[in-house]
Image: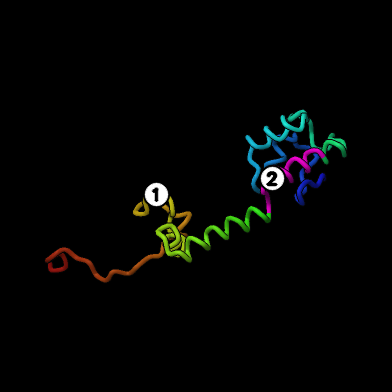
Amino acid sequence: MTRIAGVELPDNKRVVFALPRIYGIGLSLAKRICQETKIDPFKRVGELTPEEINRIEKFIETNFKIEGDLRREIQANIKRLIEINCYRGVRHVKKLPVRGQRTRSNARTRKGPRKTVATGARRKAGAGKR
């Protein structure tokens, strides 16, 4: 396995599809990295020469924030929103969707599994008398 930016990339995958395993790099960015470093995007990771690997690492290091640095920056941004007590910060604290999505029928990913609330005996007037 080849190691780029502290992440093990599988040797049997093509470069353009292996690079998105690095946090902060998606498919379009992987294509751009291959284009800028003049590496064939359909070459397998195992076929890369050490010189090509170094070119990719240096390009990523100089141009992008990835992995730990990016995670820290995102967490710092969320913490700042919470501290200034803005609407988005409050939504983060309450573990609700932040960007205006509806919560009445969806948002299960953010809210977690349903919590059943017992409401007592609800009956229509006179329904229990027969």
Element on which disc 1 rests: loop
Q: Is residue 65 magenta?
A: yes
Q: Is residue 50 above or below residue 120?
A: above
The spot of residue 53 in percent (x, y) is 82, 39
Along the viewing direction, whichever of 121 and 67 lies nearer the viewer: 67
Q: CA distance from mark 2 to mark 1?
A: 28 Å
The spot of residue 122 in percent (x, y) is 22, 66
Q: Is residue 98 left or right of residue 123?
A: right
Q: Which residue is mark 2?
A: 21
Element on which disc 2 rests: helix
Q: Which residue is mark 1?
A: 101
The residue positioned 58% from the left and 55% from the top of the image is: 74
Quarter of the image where the N terminus is located: top right
How many numbered circles does the render carry?
A: 2
Q: Main secondary structure of the magenta part?
A: helix
What residue range appears in magenta?
Answer: 55-67
